[in-house]
Amino acid sequence: MQKAVSLYREKLEWSCSYKNKLEVWARMEIIPVKQVRDCRGVIYKSAIALKLFPVLHKPAIYIATELAKYCREIMSLEGKKDGVNFEVEVISSGIIYLKLTDLSIANWLSYLISIPLQSKKPKFQVNVDHKSAETINLLPIQYTHARCCSLLRMGERDHLITLAPTTPENYSQFCLILTPDPIPWEKSNGKLQFLHHAEYELIAEIASTLDYIYCVSRTKKSINWEKIANSLNTAFQTFYCQCRIWGKVKVETPRLAKARLGLVLATQSLLKFLLEKRLGTKAPLELK
């Protein structure tokens, strides 16, 4: 989206007056993109066309259609099998919708569970809006982290996955699944394995959490990290209650069971990061 906007901005330079050009640049510096909660997957929407139409004196639908065209051209030229691509849709109001494809979700999840999360230094000093770790109840979040670790150990015990050896002394940012490699996120037809809306809700919450870590935290906006962690915790608990891994699922659809364990690992990695790097407390392997 950012590259499409940059290309469109270059095109506008030929037709805008100097005054309009400056205003267009200012309005395009911050591209409003917001995640839309939808059981179909990871979807974002942008209202940048609505920001530009007062300056360009063109209908928002026209501007949005042009930007969507640039997005599709860029993905067509630069798209790779292992890349991240979106399906682009424009509605009559001028809102642009970007939906992550199934292949892209699979690639993104594989990347997420293969490397530790890094805590990048924000461009601005961020005033984090949460209480100190001593005055808030982080036990439910810690419990869920420990539960994730337990489920991963159970998955290894039942030969669904193989984990890299870890101990409390050398425990790193995240667990690492050695096999299967890669996690079977997709069916043979290229569609995701997942069947239940709770799985997609968890995936969306994982995406939202990463947005806060890598995007929102680099702005001047304050962040309630306790709330972010609790939202991820709630999404995981719903997933855990409604999406089975063992029993009939393990016997009849082992690939689905392994994919669900992949979501457990993604959640564990994020909860550990939030607890240790944002909430200043421990992420226990187990609760005694």
Image (cartoon, rainbow, N blue to C red):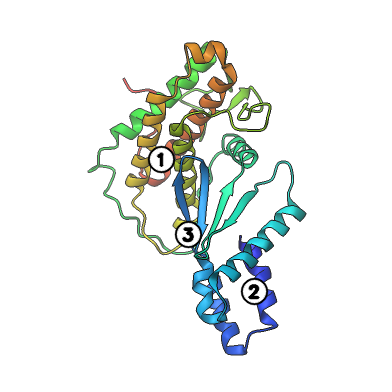
Q: Is residue 110 left or right of 137 when viewed as pictured? A: right
| Residue drawn at the location 41% of the way across and 29% of the way down | 239
The front one of 36 and 274 is 36
Which residue has dot 3 on it?
Answer: 218
Residue 186 visible at all: yes
| Kind of residue indicated by mark 2 | Arg
| Kind of residue indicated by mark 1 | Glu
Residue 202 in the image: state x and y as whole percent. 45, 36
Mark closer to the chain start, 1 or 2: 2
Which residue occupies the extreme bottom position in the image?
Answer: 18
Which residue occupies the extreme right position in the image?
Answer: 77
Up/down of 258 relative to 93, above or below: above
Q: Is residue 161 left or right of 237 when viewed as pictured? A: right
Which residue has dot 1 on it?
Answer: 276
Residue 200 in the image: state x and y as whole percent. 48, 36
| Kind of residue indicated by mark 3 | Arg
Q: Is mark 1 on a helix, strand or loop?
A: helix
Which residue has dot 2 on it?
Answer: 9
Find the distance from the CA under tag 3 to the CA under tag 1. 19 Å
Q: Which mark's residue is nearer the viewer, 3 or 1?
A: 3
Residue 285 visible at all: no
| Residue drawn at the location 61% of the way across and 62% of the way down | 2
